[in-house]
Amino acid sequence: MGFADRPYYGQRQAPGLGGLMVPGGRSVAMWLLVVNIGLFFLDGFLRRMQHGVGSDQMSFVMEWGHFSFHSAVQQGQIWRFLTYQFLHFDGWHLFGNLLALFFFAPMVEQHLGSRRFLLYYLLCGMAGAVLFLILLGVGQAVPPERIPFLLVASPTAAMVGASGAVFGVLIAALRIAPDSTVLLFFVIPVPLRVLILLILLVEIYALMVGGQSSGGSAAHLGGALVGALLIRRAHWLNWADRLRAPHLSPARLKHKARKSALERRLRREQDFEQEVDRILEKVAREGLHSLTWKEKRTLQKATEKQRQ
C-alpha cells in the first residue's frame, strides 16, 4: 500500500521517522519503536557484559522484565504484564513486530488519538499475557489430550515480545481500513482482510497443535481478541484522555511558571524597597558617613532605578 493510499497520508510528519505520521507530529507509535529498539540493544549489551559473548542466559533487563506464571502470578510481580511487551529474544522477532507497527500503528493512532492508542496498545499486550495464563492454568488441570488449544509448559516458562499488542494493532487497522491492499514481501498485492485472516489461521493452528511457539500464539490471539472488542467499543478508552490532569497541561504549566517568576520578582522588589527604607532611616539617624560600602551601593541602585 503506497503512502498516497493510506488514510493518514498528507498529515504532518513526526520527527525522526518518515513513515510515522499523525496530526501535530507527535507519534506514540514512534516512541514505541524507539523504546523497543533501545531495550533490545540494552539487553544485548548487558547480556554480553554479564555472561560473555554467545551466552544465551538472560541479562538483568530480560530477567527483570520477562513474563511467566511463576514470576507474574505466584510472586506477584504484576509489572511484568507491561514490561514483557517491550522485550524480544532475537532480532527477527523484533523486526517483524516493528515492521507491523511502522506501517499500521500510525493509522490506528490517528483514528483513536495518541492517549487512547497507547492505552489500546498496552491493553492488547496485557490481554495476550492473560490468555496465556488461562490456557496454561487450564492445561495444568485438564489433560491436554481431551481439549485442544491448552498449553503444556513449565510455570517458569518465559514469554516476551510486543506481538500481542501488535496483533491488536493489526485488528484495529482491519477495522479502520478493511479494503486496503498491502504488498506481501513488498511485492505481492494482498487485501488486508485476507492477509490478517491467514495470519490468524496460522496462529490458531500453531496453538492447536502445540509446540514451543504455542505460548506466543496464545499471546497473539489474546491481543487480537481484545483488540477486536476495543476497536468496536472505542469509547471505553475515553478515560485515557482524562489521565492528563488540567494542572499538568503545557499551557497550565507555562502559566504557572510565569506566575511563579512574577511572584519571585515582586518579592525581590519588596525586599529591595525595605532595605532602601532601612538605609534611609540609618542616614537620617547617623549620617551618610555611617553607611557601609554595600549600603551605599544599594542606595546608588535605588537612585538609578528611580531615574529610569
Image: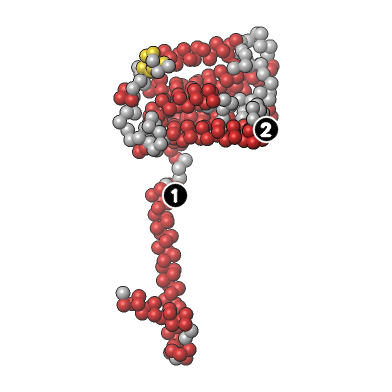
Q: Amino acid at mark 2?
A: His
In terms of depth relative to the viewer, which is nearer, 300 or 139? 300
In terms of depth relative to the viewer, which is nearer, 58 or 209? 58
**Residue 22 rendering spot, x and y as whole percentages:** 37, 33
Name which residue lies at 35% across and 20% down: 1
Q: Is residue 66 left or right of residue 5?
A: right
* Relative height, residue 74 to residue 275 (above, below): above
Q: Is residue 157 left or right of residue 96?
A: right
Q: Quadrant of residue 42?
A: top right
Whether residue 180 can be seen here: yes
Query: As drawn, which residue projects farthest toward the front?
Result: 53
Which of marks 2 and 1 precedes in the sequence? Answer: 2
- The residue wearing badge 1 is 247
Q: Quadrant of residue 74?
A: top right
Q: Is residue 268 left or right of residue 83?
A: left
Name which residue lies at 56% across and 13% down: 206
Name which residue lies at 32% across and 33% down: 11
Quadrant in which the C terminus is drawn: bottom left
Q: How many marks?
A: 2
Mark 2 neighbour density, 10 Å: few (under 14) some (14–19) many (20 or more): few
Q: Which mark is residue 51?
A: 2
In terms of depth relative to the viewer, which is nearer, 304 or 285? 304
**Residue 265 rendering spot, x and y as whole percentages:** 41, 66
- Residue at mark 1 to residue at mark 2: CA–CA distance: 47 Å
Q: Amino acid at mark 1?
A: His
Q: Nearer the viewer, mark 1 or mark 2?
A: 2
**Residue 106 rendering spot, x and y as whole percentages:** 40, 29
Q: Secondary structure at mark 1?
A: helix
Mark 1 neighbour density, 10 Å: few (under 14) some (14–19) many (20 or more): few
Query: As drawn, which residue projects farthest toward the top?
Result: 146
